[in-house]
Image (tube, rainbow, N blue to C red):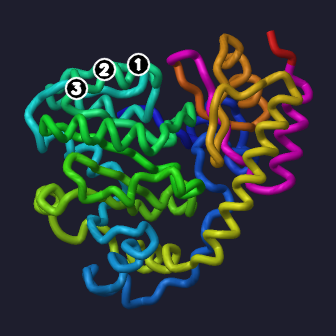
């Protein structure tokens, strides 16, 4: 199993700090997630039904009806490599680890390309897969550039796959309005912006034939009834969404400034996390963990990803810890 953010129980055991005493900044999830109301008994007692309004709520929220609800992005990440013969797949040097793992497991040849090198390489690829914004670097690309890459890949039967798990905070950068064009696949999830990671709900956007292939491979009832009910309501709560986008933009600036004030200028980030890169990162990870603050560590680089504190007490705790840090 690949390592991901979270793992608070393991950290508690390793550092001898009780679970309830940790500040978990390791996941990149919105710590002020959508407030879940009581769930109706009916959603627990009946098999999930597709006419419950979830698909329509998602089509309205995302702006495209060409979608398939899935149990988080993970089923699509695992199945997409099985839907085409082994080929050449390009990704960024550092990205969400589940993507390269599954493409390589199914016989595809993986190549890594820095953002500035993708344009020169795209005509040698069968698939270009980008997390957008990238996890963990926060790298984004111009919509016109993405559209050009999609057209060049599609002309040879290739795919552009965009994992937009962190896109909800800045939807103006999304390519969802292009869905339906040949070769474009977009993945979205309610785990990050809505803070509903435990619901395990995501959506695949693509042309109808591909969605049908995925639906047949996944099978029926892939999302449980309570999750369908909650996510439908969250997608319909436009007032909360608008207010939260503003809050996250302010919190991003606050976290950037806090890190800079302590000599830790971010190398990248998004409205939900900041990314630090440098030889000091392993020492900073351990320094924070010994004070009950968990961040996400990446061996490649090395680098760290810090999510947003959940409340003012969390902000003050992070600032107090960083004030004691002396960068090597």
For label 2, count other residues whose C-alpha is less than 10 Å away and answer few (under 14), some (14-19) or many (20+).
Answer: some
Q: Are marks 1 and 2 in contact (CB under 8 Å)?
A: yes
- Relative height, residue 35 to residue 76 (above, below): below
Residue at image x 24%, y 59%?
A: 180
Q: Position of residue 323 (x, y in %)?
A: 91, 29
Residue bearing mark 3? 125
Distance CA(mark 1)–CA(mark 3): 13 Å
Instruction: Please tell me whether mark 2 sits on a helix, a strand or a loop.
Output: helix
Residue 2's quadrant in the figure? top left
Secondary element at tag 1: helix
Residue 45 x %, y %: 33, 86
Identify the disc placed on residue 270: none
* Location of the N terminus (image quadrant): top left
From the top left corner, tell me how far across and down residue 96 is, in percent: 43, 35
Image: 270 above or below 198: above
Which residues lie in the magenta part?
Answer: 300-325
For residue 66, above or below residue 171:
below
Q: Which mark is residue 117?
A: 1
Work out how far the residue at label 1 is from the one at label 2, CA to CA, in angstroms.
7 Å
């Amino acid at each position: 199993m690949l390592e991901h953010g979270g793992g608070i129980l393991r950290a508690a055991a390793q550092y001898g700090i009780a679970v309830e005493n940790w500040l978990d900044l390791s996941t990149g999830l919105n710590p002020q997630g959508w407030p879940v109301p009581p769930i109706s008994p009916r959603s627990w007692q009946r098999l999930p039904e597709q006419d419950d309004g979830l698909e329509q709520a998602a089509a309205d929220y995302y702006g495209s009806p060409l979608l398939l609800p899935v149990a988080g992005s993970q089923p699509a990440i695992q199945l997409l490599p099985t839907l085409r013969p082994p080929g050449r797949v390009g990704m960024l040097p550092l990205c969400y680890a589940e993507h390269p793992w599954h493409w390589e497991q199914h016989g595809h040849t993986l190549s890594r390309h820095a953002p500035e090198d993708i344009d020169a390489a795209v005509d040698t690829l069968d698939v270009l897969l980008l997390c957008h914004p990238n996890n963990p670097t926060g790298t984004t690309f111009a919509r016109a550039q993405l559209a050009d890459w999609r057209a060049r890949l599609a002309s040879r039967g290739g795919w552009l796959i965009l994992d937009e798990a962190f896109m909800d905070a800045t939807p103006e950068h999304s390519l969802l309005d292009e869905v339906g064009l040949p070769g474009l696949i977009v993945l979205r999830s309610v785990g990050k912006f809505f803070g509903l990671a435990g619901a395990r709900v995501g959506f695949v956007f693509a042309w109808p034939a591909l969605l049908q292939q995925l639906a047949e491979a996944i099978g029926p009832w892939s999302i449980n009834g309570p999750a369908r009910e909650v996510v439908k309501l969250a997608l319909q709560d436009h007032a909360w969404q608008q207010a939260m986008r503003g809050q996250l933009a302010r919190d991003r600036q606050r976290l950037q400034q806090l890190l800079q004030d302590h000599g830790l200028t971010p190398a990248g980030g998004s409205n939900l996390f900041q990314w630090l890169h440098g030889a000091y990162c392993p020492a900073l990870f351990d320094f924070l963990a010994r004070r009950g603050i968990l961040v996400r560590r990446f061996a490649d680089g090395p680098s760290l990803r810090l999510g947003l504190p959940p409340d003012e007490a969390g902000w003050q705790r992070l600032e107090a810890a960083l004030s004691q840090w002396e960068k090597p």
